[in-house]
Image (spheres, coloured by chain):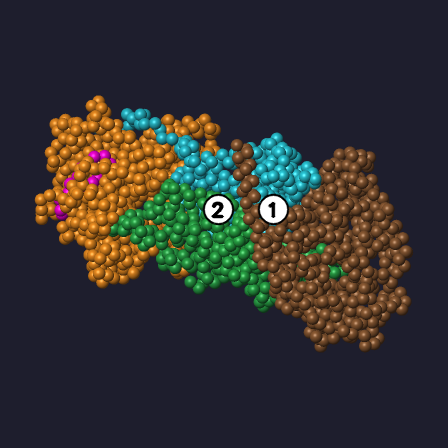
Amino acid sequence: MLRYILLRGVLALAVAFTVSLAAFLLLNVATDPARAIAGEDATPEVVQTIRVRYGLDQPMPVRYAQWLGGVVQGDFGESYYWHKPVAELVAERAGVTIALALAAMAVTILIAIPLGVLAALNPNSWIDRTALGVAVSAQAVPNFWLGLIMIILFSVTFPIFPVSGDATWMHFVLPAFVLGATSVPAVMRLTRTGLIEVMGADYIRTARSKGYSGASLLWRHALRNALLPVISVLAVQLGQKFGGSVITESIFALNGLGRLALESILGADIPTVQMLIFVFAIVFVVMNLLADILNAALDPRIRIG
Amino acid sequence: MAPLLEIRNLSVSLELPNARLHAVRGATVSLDRGQTLGIVGESGSGKSMTALALMRLLPRGAEVNLDRLAFDSQDLTAVPDAVFAREILGRRMAMIFQEPMTSLNPVYTIGRQLTEASVRQGVLSAKVAHQRAIALLDRTGIPDPAGRMSQYPHQLSGGQRQRVMIAMALMMEPELLIADEPTTALDVTVQAQILELLAGLQCEMGMAMILISHDLAVVSEHTDRVAVMYGGEMIEEGRAAEVMAAAKHPYTQALLKAIPRMDGPPVKLAAIPGTVPSTTSIPKACIFASRCDFVRDVCRSGRPPVQGSDEHWRRCILGETELATQRQASPVAAMVRKAVEASTAPVIEARDIVQVFQSRRGLFGPKKEIRAVDGVNLTLKRGETLALVGESGSGKSTLARVMLGLSLPTSGSVLMRGKTLGGMSPRERAALVQPVFQDPYSSLNPRRTLAEIIVRPLELRGDGNSQTRLARVREVMDMVRLPQRLIHNYPAQLSGGQRQRVAIARALVTSPEALVCDEPTSALDVSVQAQILNLLTDLQANLGLSCLVITHDMGVVHQIANRVAVMLKGKLVEEGSTDAVLNHSSHEYTRTLLAAAPRFRAEETRLEFSGHE
Amino acid sequence: MIKLKRAVGSTLFAITLSLSLSTAPAFAKKADDTLRVAMAEEILNLDYNYTTKREYIILAQMTDASLFDVDPKTQEIVPSVASGYKFIDDKTLDVTLRTDVKFHDGSVLNAEDVAYTYNWIIDPKSESNATGIIGRWLDRVEVTGANTLRFHMKAVYPLALRDMAQRIMLRKKDTYNPGGVVNKNAMAQKVNGTGPYKVTSFKPGQEVVLERFDGFFGPKPAIKKIIVRNIPDIGTQQAELMAGGVDWMFNVPLDLAQSLGATPIAKHLSGPDLRVSFVVLDAAGYTDPKGPLTKVEVRRAINYALNRGEMAKFLIGGSAEGIHTACHPAQFGCDQKSVDYPYNPAKAKEMLKAAGYPNGFPLDLWAYREKPVAEAVAADLTAAGIKVNLRYVKLESLDQARANKQISAYIGTWGSGGTADTAAIARIHFSDETDRNLSGDAQLNKDVLAAEQTNDENKRRELYTKAVGRIADQAYWAPLFTYSANYLVSPELNFPLDSDGLPRLQNASWK
Amino acid sequence: MNIGIEPNLTAAEEPAPLTPRQIMRRRARKHRSLMIGAGIILVLAFIALFAPLLAPHDPFVQSLGKRMLPPVWVQGGNWDYLLGTDQNGRDYLSRLIYGAQVSMVIGIGAATIGLLIGVTLGVLAGYFGGWVDHAVSFLLTAQLALPGLLLAMALVFIIGPSVWVVIGIIGVLHWTYYLVVTRSATQRIRQLDFVAAASASGATSRQIIWHEILPNLISQIIVIFTFELGIAILAEASLSFLGVGIQPPTPSWGLMIAEGKAMMFYRPWLVILPGICLFVLVIGANLMGDGLRDITAPEGRN
């Protein structure tokens, strides 16, 4: 068991480093951080002083080596804009993104799974068709557009929810719905096909022959097997959501990692981007590992083999 | 006393995407307490559907209508589903299924699955249920029953899982046990034990049993009465011994002649031509008319009447006397089996083949080594049919793949015409040996037409142009007796038998010297198996092919093989001519294999068992 | 049928509009005397000595006072922390300080503090954003008395007082290197300024709360408390304005300002701005030595092709107007008599044919600011036959491409830092020290630098007239228009609009 | 009793069952959502193809005087510009029509690039397994971890903004769905006997992949392609919304939504209209995808 986790850990680090190297190259090529920090009306002298101040005048490999050296000792360097250690910056904002991710996951689960189960229990009925209709249309709605419409409807026309910011839980309702809605189709479809397949399996027929029927059959025998693949998909999606949704967070002005990523990428705040990517890669692989472990815990065939 | 179970005129129709399939029409059956009824028929005959209708386990969209369904003289049609599920299913009627590998819930322990139904319905307390489960597991012959309770289904073998299924069915001591092809997926030796077990339990618990199978031999040994089904209708029913000895319906007769018999010299099998008609519309004529040898105009105009006594009736217009005369009229041509001289040149030689596989138990378990083939020497001589016999896990398929050159052995070598397989180019090897696989549905590329499939090996060798190749394809299709008009059809449009013929045609197109057939007929119905076996013997005679046939069915060995090799756990335990091995085998394992194979003891009825009647 | 559809359609939009606009600000701001201000740029550092962006200038106006100040009406330099000044000769300046200037922490400002601030800024170790600007003309500062200082200048520089007024924020002695240890971010999170407002709470990137500083030596501001909120998304800013979370928005796009201004929610103010927009052409041929832009007729044709008037009127609105000089008409020395190329697309096509490009030529036009302006310029040039490939990028990407000499033409803007003097735009664009100079005109370079080395007003005016005339004649640029600053403010707020376009929140008051 | 010879093969009365393709066509006609989806896609493809003829005005011609005209059903609108004009006074309806062109081209282009990368890697990983499989899954994890936005922004700057760059970017970011499906399908097909038969008759790996495995993947690949079409179109819209996608003055629905965002409270149609167009196009693609999957599923699986 330990060997397996160690292997995945090494994979996580390898992925994190390759991705951060790629990001470092892309960023340096795309924009000149010094000019981004200096802003619009900066004279060349100002740009030069900034370049010296942040050591941007050294060649790229040297700067990457410095950054790497720091990372090994846990120091991810200082943000050019925020003048504070990036680790602190990420820690501050991680809370908002985690809350949003969990809320969005709750929205997905509360909508997708019941819908999927109902659709599977009576295939080709009107519930099935509406469930598929919801899935198809939710998949077709651009989430940035959905966000704007939500603000127009529920913050301005009917001022129920606050427009932006992340102070109270009320601030998270609309963003969670928008972020959650994007992954409803996939989860709903997976639940539906999974349950339909399980309901046709031999061991369900055996259970029926022992007198199980209706709700007890569903809860005791069918659901547990049907939801196995769904759980690993949810874990992976949660991993992606921990990476922060760039669009949802910027539309609702939530101070999460997503918005931080967007601004630091557009503003070429390299240390912040590096750390964010590093964190995203690690979180992503860890969530994959978690999905595997969860699967093994729930499915004896994998655990005991 | 009133029969335990009475079914009259049961019809089942299933909903297909674009039609309704009338799977069962007018099934009438009755069963007394403690009695065993066998329902036999080929695939698609509706035998399973009848049982599922009884247990109300039909798939969604199925329709059942019947005149009378009484269980212990209680009219079941009046019982609503919920009450039926709670009071009848599991407590008074139980069922075991064909596929042990998938019939148990993979995520729950054996113990829980055994006890949960009885505890939930309050029939037994948890403690009593637990003890009863262990007792039943022990009775069904599972080693260390207490330990098994906490294990999961995937940790048990096929045979053990079937025993668990039987224990589970008997937890609440049902009065009727329905066994739907209980042993089809198991090895011959295990099959015999399970059938013995079922018979024993039935006597002990005085249960009535319905045994559904496609294997006439199994049914003839283990049932009191037998009903023969074809195309969704019951065409003959009577006492088992009588039906087997003097079948009164042409289909049953043809079926009995299509089964390779172990007693007496090999006989040319009577294959039934054509395929089972589709029952998407209710047929007006006799269902067997399209394939019957004695068909008359009247058979095609109306449904044949039921003739014969309650003891033994059949649905056919032929009178008692006409049938009897027909039976003698068709003499059975004995086949002579050439003995193979030791001196003939070898075609394929396998020298001390060892094949080891690595497998990891579970995601985190340690790596384990499995020696599938452990030092085997085998030679296939020119013009002979060598049968390689063994149970699942004996390594016979692995050896076959090695001799085909599809996988390189861990050690040892395979020679063809003196040259090692490894040294040969794939194209050279293709000219020497070709495979025929077991499952007709996965041996042909669904996306290609027949022409493309059969011509492919020629294209790969690149000899001749498209005309010569097409001619060769047509020639080979005639050889395997495939109608030319099918040349542009897709595999999905053919029957199992036809597909296996295409596979053989593909193997023959490069005119190889040897064929390696891995269980060529075990996935086919008896009547279709007879066609393929006859084809193989004819081809071998006409083309002088040497065939290596892998099988677990002693009947097939007896029918077509000149020599036999028996494998057990990766080792060759016995090798010799068919007569030597079958009649006075030297190895104890071969003897158990032969004993386990179901045979037609036409005369020995089941009287000694049913003494208690 | 159409009538029905039309009726239904319009009602739908009418409902959403009226409903959304009827929610007047929930509570009158006057009650809690707090002005909530929205800014798109995230305020991350309170110390203007280490920042440059416009939002930081607005903030510094409130938190800090400097030696001099610019009179909003007359744009003249007036004494502020300094009570008076006298030029001993054209390179030394004596300044006397007021004695009643207090820092926010209550301590009194003295000559030592001022000297320390200036000497620290010009010391390269400070790496301050102002080091380059001040270091060019100031040698050192010497304390000559309890509240008198002497400034020794390296060279004659007419804009010295303006720089002192707008660039250097005064700090207590040893703020940045207490005990010799350099701490550039000393004032980043908690600024100890001398201005009319002091910072009571600061959440970087989210919010800055300022309250009136009673110890301020100058006129007390009318509003007790100002909260600066960072809201990056313009849509969200509007929603906050409507929901009452914000009372003042600046840099508002024209259409939005006009639409929202027409509702009871907010008032649309539009004031003058020193910022100008222009198209810089690669006359020197950095991208293509023999390219079309090196020919003056082509550059003049481009000037004729652009409909400056319409762009100013429809895309910027307010006091914006087309210009034909490489400077803002209100800036000293910006001679309006230089040659003009009134909009004449036919003439432009003709000149292009004459210059040897009958069916135009491909041109990469870079832009970063207002997208409608970029598309309008691109459309006008396409109409004149030039095959424009519009490259709309981030500012820093454009700067980088220009530094690598990859840009043949780009639409630029310059705010001159609110300085009404041509020097503030000429040197940065036409001297040889900058990569923005695509004219390749040596003589022009000399004139522009010379105009900054003399205090003689007439001499400077004469030099600038020559330079501006030269630029117009050689059409190194295609000047476009001046900007107008659009604000959306709560109807209850009095907000003065000054001619240099610099918003001065400290002068705001309730109606 | 005829011995083993089949004289009277009487299958003649029974019509030979339909070829798989006929079965699919018959099912397709009856599959409502497939018809609707295909209908929408055809109409939009028609609009995209004949945009120059259909559009009332040239989408690039500006008339600054007539900026921000409302659509005809709102007072102040005029009939020359049915859906009003945008910030630069260009006809909004024409830009929407040309926007269809951009979205379709990008959708199809990106989905194809994704297909080429994903299927190749999927088949290789599925067929050869071992280290190829590990390398591909490492690439998969790394690609999922790298934020697409960064890649888009950098490429748009380095190579310069053109429709092809955007297609390339989105294509490179969206091959994972193809990979996962083709990899497991290839692994499944590889076990089937007709692959063993092919290698027994001397086919090389390449021939087996090309002749035996790929034909069986085509129906699944088509299904994924239609879904990816929708996803790619949305991806372009998001990139353009963030300003790193399609560059002005090319009309793109995502860009139009971004431009309309500032005025969404006063001129909501600037945001709503392109949003609806995107929604209709993508829902058409998804309905078609669902339909194709239903009618190909049964054959696909055996």
Q: Quadrant of residue B342?
A: top left
Identity of the residue drawn at 73% across and 52% down: C271
Q: Which mark is residue D266?
A: 1
Q: Position of residue D8 (x, y in %)?
A: 28, 25
**Of C415 and A266, the residue lying toward us:** C415
**Of B594 and A151, the residue lying toward us:** A151
Which chain has been coloured green in this picture?
A: A
Residue furthest to the top in view is B297
Q: Position of residue B186 (x, y in %)?
A: 27, 48
Which chain has been coloured orange in this picture?
A: B
Tell me the crowding category of disc 2: few under 14, some 14 to 19, or many 20 or more residues within 10 angstroms, Cα based. many
Q: Quadrant of residue C115?
A: bottom right
Q: Position of residue B377 (x, y in %)?
A: 34, 48
Q: Is residue A260 visible?
A: no
Mark 2, chain letter? A
Q: Is residue A197 left or right of residue A60?
A: left
**Of B171 and C316, the residue lying toward us:** C316
Q: Is residue B20 magenta?
A: no
Q: Is residue B229 positioned above or below A246 on the image?
A: above
Q: Is residue B197 positioned above or below B273 on the image?
A: below
Q: Is residue A218 visible?
A: yes
Which chain has been coloured cyan in this picture?
A: D
Q: For the stretch drawn in magenta, what is the main secondary structure?
A: strand
